[in-house]
Image (cartoon, helix red, strand yellow):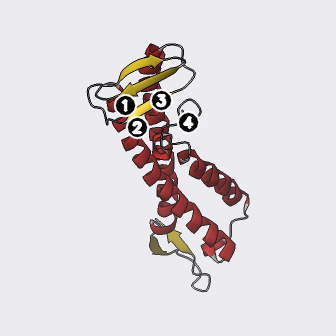
């Protein structure tokens, strides 16, 4: 989107939302490769889990923001009125308003290609970011559940010196 239109802002082309997902996945691989230490006594394991939880939460928030922007832009593109000017396609919301914001799409042979494919791209971005939000929510939930939903049920029967705890 940024390549065909120089008038789009950074928030209108949410390529940056996938960057956090790449970092989270790399961090997940590192977390998977670290040898598990019981009771999280290793500082490295604790820091990586904390960073993983933070990045998953941040990725979830970013994905929701991107979904909101893309839904807004989807409704905007449905009300575009476009005209061709040489090799460019110039779209506005209100052709009667002389100070309305104009979106310039360069090197487009037919404006109907913009008005038909742009909403499809926005819907695709909504679906992909919804999948990303679900993955980030699942990752944050699993780390939280692993850390805070472990309850001790009491001592196992047997030798009092061993004192083995049961997890429920």
The label nearer to you, 2 versus 3, is 3
Q: Quadrant of residue 79?
A: top left
Q: Give how far apart the Cα atoms at labels 1 and 3 are.
A: 17 Å
The label nearer to you, 1 versus 4, is 4
Which residue does the image show at 46% across and 65% down from the upper left?
Answer: 168
Q: Give how far apart the Cα atoms at labels 4 and 2 are.
A: 14 Å
* Residue 149 visible, this orientation: yes
* Residue 137 visible, this orientation: no
The mark that comes first in sequence, 1 or 4, is 4
The mark that comes first in sequence, 1 or 3, is 1
Disc 1, SS: helix
Q: Residue furthest bottom?
A: 161
Disc 3, SS: strand
Which residue does the image show at 31% across and 29% down from the upper left?
Answer: 93
- Where is residue 99 shown, x and y percent of the image? 31, 37
Q: Are marks 1 and 4 in contact (CB under 8 Å)?
A: no
The label nearer to you, 1 versus 3, is 3
Q: Are marks 2 and 3 in contact (CB under 8 Å)?
A: no
Q: Are marks 2 and 1 in contact (CB under 8 Å)?
A: yes
- Where is residue 41 shown, x and y percent of the image? 64, 78
Q: Quadrant of the N terminus?
A: top right
Q: Which residue is mark 1?
A: 74
Q: Which residue is mark 2?
A: 70
Numbered badge on residue 2: 4
Numbered badge on residue 104: 3
Give the camera-side residue of 4 and 158. Answer: 4
- Where is residue 104 shown, x and y percent of the image? 47, 29
Give the camera-side residue of 82 and 116. Answer: 82
Q: Give how far apart the Cα atoms at labels 2 and 1 are.
A: 6 Å
The residue carrying pointer 4 sits among few (fewer than 14), some (14 to 19) or many (20 or more) residues within 10 Å by Cα, namely some
């Amino acid at each position: 989107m940024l390549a065909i239109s120089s008038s789009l802002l950074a928030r209108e082309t949410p390529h940056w939302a996938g960057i956090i997902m790449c970092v989270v996945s790399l961090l997940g691989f590192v977390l998977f490769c670290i040898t598990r230490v019981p009771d999280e006594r290793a500082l490295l394991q604790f820091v990586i889990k904390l960073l993983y939880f933070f990045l998953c939460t941040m990725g979830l928030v970013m994905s929701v923001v991107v979904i909101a922007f893309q839904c807004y832009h989807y409704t905007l593109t449905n009300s575009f009125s476009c005209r061709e000017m040489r090799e460019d396609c110039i779209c506005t919301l209100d052709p009667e308003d002389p100070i309305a914001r104009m979106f310039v799409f360069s090197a487009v042979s037919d404006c109907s290609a913009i008005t038909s494919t742009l909403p499809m791209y926005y819907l695709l971005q909504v679906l992909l970011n919804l999948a990303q939000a679900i993955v980030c929510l699942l990752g944050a939930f699993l780390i939280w559940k692993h850390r805070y939903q472990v309850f001790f049920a009491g001592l196992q029967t047997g030798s009092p010196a061993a004192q083995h705890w049961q997890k429920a």
